[in-house]
Image (cartoon, rainbow, N blue to C red):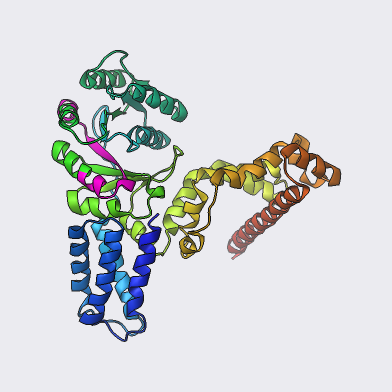
Amino acid sequence: MFENLSERLERSFKILKGEGKITEINVAETMKDVRRALLDADVSYKVAKEFCDRVKDKAIGTGVLTAVKPQQMMVKIVHDELAEFMGSDAVEVNIKGNPGVVLVAGLNGSGKTTFCGKFALRLKSRGVKVMLAACDTFRPAAIEQLKTLGEQVGVPVFSLEGEKDPVKVAKAAISKAGQEGYSTVIVDTAGRLAVDAELMEEIRTLHSALKPSESLFVVDSMTGQDAVESAKAFNEAIDYEGVVLTKLDGDTRGGAALSIKAVTGKPIKFVSTGEKMEALDLFHPSRVADRILGMGDVVSLVEKAQEAFDEKEARETRKKLAKNQFNLNDFYNQIQQVRKMGDIKDLASMIPGMGKMIKDVDIDNDAAFKSTEAIYHSMTPYEREHPEAINGSRRRRIADGSGTTIADVNKLLKQFEGSRKMMKMAVDGSLAARLKNFRG
């Protein structure tokens, strides 16, 4: 995410390296390079110019502290302006009503219907009773797609077979949701290949009839300035509350993320960074600015870990470690929880400095876990519970059964043992600290 922009900005800041102070000349030179970097990232000329002018105004005359170098000061100013351009603070959805209605709009291929499924899962995981309404009566496969997604996330999908009027479908869904105690209805609407009069009239009619508490516009971030223009057109039609950027994991430019708020005045509320249904994140402008400038995003990484790891399971694991009963079943469960956190490369890029190190490394998320799972499933229940019993002949049988080598089996068992030792040390240290505090 934003790899090219990050590299270009890093090169721009090198102009100030070694300079004793910030001057109008070196700031102008730096900002000229920054503007080029933004234009290459598909940020509109008008937005790029406004951004650079604001940074320049703040930088010129800024008193640089003795402990802070001009280059560091410029990074700080650019960071703050990037965050402000993207919206400053994260903005959650505000769902009101009984049931509350969320209208989801967007062009075909933007990931609109998939977002509906992801958003339903997000609400469900927070204890919200949610229903999906299939109101895309234009595209034949859309209703089936939404039903499939509904099954995946365990959320009911309402549809009216043969009904072509999306308003009738939506109103019937809202009525049924109210009768059955659902607190939120997510309305998936029809898209088109491009912004056209028919699409705009339909979305306006739906918006007017339903009066949703939240309207979200879904846009493919890889379309750059086209994304900004369609966001502008939809905002003029329905005055939506927020934007959802999809496919951000595949976009190395980031122009849409940097431009939409400045052009439409509407906040980016969510970003989708993968194909898995859990791959939906609240958009934090300051954290995204951190990542653009190569500072990582440790806070988001911790939040992902908290969401993926079950607290009850963690307590059980601690008990097993304390009693030296941690086995390969527990180790496998830990690996599955790490998998839930998302794409490995994306997670690694949240660690400061790692993004640059792994940018050219091709990581296949599924392949990374494939051999581990194959080896685990080739073990007997007894072997998983008693890894110390896995001798040479058992290792050979496991390797043959999993289509791997004995070296692969040895590597996994070594990783398991290392993981068990490290976690036991952490648990023992925690217990010792608690005992010390209790005695004190």
Residue at left offset 26%, top offset 44%: 243
Residue at left offset 40%, top offset 54%: 1
**In the drawing, does residue 369 fall left or right of residue 116?**
right
Name the residue furthest top. Answer: 162
Residue at left offset 22%, top offset 34%: 213
Q: How many marks?
A: 0
Residue range of the region highlighted in magenta in the rendering:
206-229
In magenta segment, residue 207: yes
Give the quarter of the figure containing the C terminus. Answer: bottom right
**In the drawing, does residue 70 fall left or right of residue 51?**
right
Q: Quadrant of residue 209?
A: top left
| Residue 344 position (above or below residue 310) | below
Tell me where residue 410 appears, x and y as whole percent: 75, 51
Q: Quadrant of residue 35?
A: bottom left
In magenta segment, residue 91: no
Q: Quadrant of residue 137?
A: top left
Residue 379 shows up from this direction: no
Tell me where residue 145 appears, x and y as whole percent: 39, 26
Tell me where residue 389 appears, x and y as whole percent: 82, 44
Depth check, front residue: 428 or 342: 342
**In the drawing, does residue 197 fall left or right of residue 440?**
left
